[in-house]
Amino acid sequence: MASFVAGVAPATAADGGTKAFVGARIVPVAGNDIADGVLLVRSGRIDAVGPRSEVTVPAGAAVIDAAGRVIFPGLVDTHSHIGDVDLAERSAPIQPELRVLDSVNVRDASLQRARAGGITTANIMSGSGMLMSGQTVYLKLRAGDTIDDLLIRAEDGWIAGGMKMANGTNSRAEPPFPGSRAKSSALVRATFIKAQEYRDKLAAAADDEEQAPDRDIGMEALVEVLEGRRIVHHHTHRHDDVLTVLRLRDEFGFRVVLHHVSDAAKVADRIAAAGVPSSLILVDSPGGKLEARDLDWGGGPALLKAGGRVAFHTDDFINDSRLFLRSAAFGVRAGMSRQAGLEAVTLAGAEMLDLGGRIGSLEPGKDADFIVLSGDPLSVYTRVLQTWVEGEKVFDLDDEGDRLIADGGYGAGSPRQLHLDCFFDGEAR
């Protein structure tokens, strides 16, 4: 398929290391739009971004004519279930030892759909059927074959991720699960007290293995939470459940991002005063759980007015990853500023994953994660034409296979193909 149909003109020269995207309107998020811009990418990082008149394209760089297009940061999804992950382990209500890392299928078509939607980084987590359902994992949606190819790691090798927690109706059930909100909170408190005791015993033992407590991988993860390295990503909807999360946060000092927050407008001042960010979901059709019945698109504007920080997420399959960009427009429609809406699908989410220094905006030194759009990010008519992760293209609407993923249809994204001797090119023989 010819590249001029929907995509970007091919490179005119190449040295194998540097790419220059020239002529697009660049929306860096951190800074004003650039009408006739140049995005210079070198070794997977953004080397320069600015007006054509100010950025020198080095000799031998691969020059990509992006005139008539819009270049925008890669989208950051703070709450996703792509990868065919296990949503709930129903053997106990609190299981911090579980790692979603061990259940992600990176070859699942849902990751391809996310790339087609312009998502370049995602927080993959299990479901909300437990009070504590385990460790999430932050993935770069690189074109990899195994989970190791997509992991985001700290300099010391630590696999980046948070801790998924939930309250409200989802985590209530027959014993051993709690039957009430009060019991839910009591179980969580008891678990964090145990984690504090485990932490203190480790500290007291220092390097004396004989004095150290028996190893507990669940407690190890919760010590990371108590120390602030692992952020709690907390499913919560009703205003009283939101306040319970804030209360627990004050008691134990962990860092938390509120997720969903259907009643955000009702307690926006309390959330903002606590300095706790919120990752909201905006759905445009009724249904779902009873506690989300008061879902209000005005939650985002209310939080911002109160001084809070707001991001959006898909909760895929609740919202299809291919449609994530429209959440920014929904936010603006509800009363958020254009800038806040654009940040809510990029930089704000990156900050909630402790990745704001690497991704979420187009700035020199950051990872070259970006998308090429056919028009304005807030337009209903705009399509994602290309998705790039660390300077490598992972989605191209001009590619027939990628277009099938983007547009859906029979067999879209199916990992299986027909292999029967009695068929050839779709015809019997």
Image (cartoon, rainbow, N blue to C red):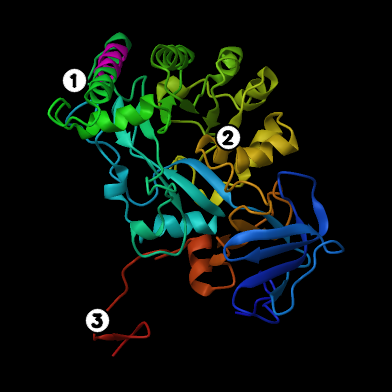
Q: Which residues are magenta?
A: 185-194
Of the two numbered discs 2 and 1 on the same chain, state the one appearing first in sequence: 1
- Is 189 part of what is drawn in magenta? yes
Query: Could you tell me which secondary element the residue under label 1 belongs to?
Result: loop
- Is 188 part of what is drawn in magenta? yes
Q: Position of residue 121 (x, y in %)?
A: 50, 49
The CA distance from mark 2 to mark 1 is 34 Å
Please report the residue visible at 40 percent of the width from the left and 49 percent of the height from the top.
Answer: 82
Tell me if residue 384 can be seen: no
* Residue bearing mark 3: 420
Q: Position of residue 198 (x, y in %)?
A: 23, 22
The CA distance from mark 3 to mark 1 is 48 Å
Q: Nearer the viewer, residue 131 or 206?
A: 206
Mark 3 and mark 1 in contact? Answer it, CB < 8 Å: no
Of the two numbered discs 3 and 2 on the same chain, state the one appearing first in sequence: 2
The CA distance from mark 3 to mark 2 is 48 Å
Please report the residue visible at 41 percent of the width from the left and 29 percent of the height from the top.
Answer: 232
Tell me if residue 43 can be seen: yes
Please report the residue visible at 64 percent of the width from the left and 71 percent of the height from the top.
Answer: 18
Q: Nearer the viewer, mark 3 or mark 2?
A: 2
Q: Quadrant of the C terminus?
A: bottom left
* Residue bearing mark 2: 311
